[in-house]
Image (cartoon, grey):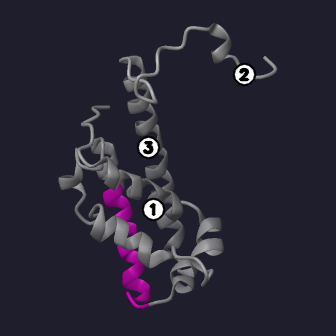
Amino acid sequence: MIDHGIALPYYRLHVVPAVVALASPTWQREVWLDPDRFEDLDHTVHVLFDDFCDAHNPLPWLGQCLRSEEEVELMARLGAAYSAVQDSVGAAARDEVYLDAPGWPAVVASAARLAQVLVSNDHSALSNLHDAGHRWPPGAGPVTSGTQDHHVGS
């Protein structure tokens, strides 16, 4: 994998949770269908198609909020799966109608694969930063004691 880095990490902080939400039918039903919660399908779609990426055409987002060609390809698949459902139920349909649509499992599956790749790539990028000597918080020194790497009970 070539990690192109990302110029807009703040955007990615919105994209990843939106994809994870699309990958979780339980989250969708418990959060999106709760009228007291802010997040719903419309919010998630705006994040991925309008505000922080364009799932219809994700290639320009490579190096911006997407790290790899695989992420671009999987985002395009997610965009296509969502658009197929939207075409079948209508853009104005309620969230419940989307979630019950026959094509919705394809959206969830596409999002799940993309979520796996996004998180894996972020983990790899973080690991590479750590290996290069970057520590958090800034100014923190390297780990010097072997006991800090052990899990409790090991």
* Cα–Cα span, label 1 and label 2: 32 Å
User: As drawn, is 4 to the left or to the right of 103?
Assistant: left
Residue 18 numbered tag: 1
Q: Which residue is mark 3?
A: 117
Residue 77 numbered tag: none
> Looking at the rendering, in which quadrant would you find the N terminus?
top left
Within-10-Å neighbours for mark 3: few <14, some 14–19, many 20+: some
Residue furthest to the right:
153
- The stretch in magenta equals 75-92
Indicate whether 98 appears above or below 112.
below
Q: Nearer the viewer, residue 5 or 81?
A: 5
User: As drawn, is 115 to the left or to the right of 99?
Assistant: left
Q: Nearer the viewer, mark 1 or mark 2?
A: 2
For image coordinates 41% across by 91% down, the residue present is 92
| Label 1 or label 2, whichever comes before in sequence order | 1
For image coordinates 34% across by 56% down, the residue present is 75
User: As drawn, is 140 to the left or to the right of 153?
Assistant: left
Residue furthest to the front:
139
Within-10-Å neighbours for mark 1: few <14, some 14–19, many 20+: many
Q: Are marks 1 and 2 in contact (CB under 8 Å)?
A: no
Q: Nearer the viewer, residue 43 or 96?
A: 43
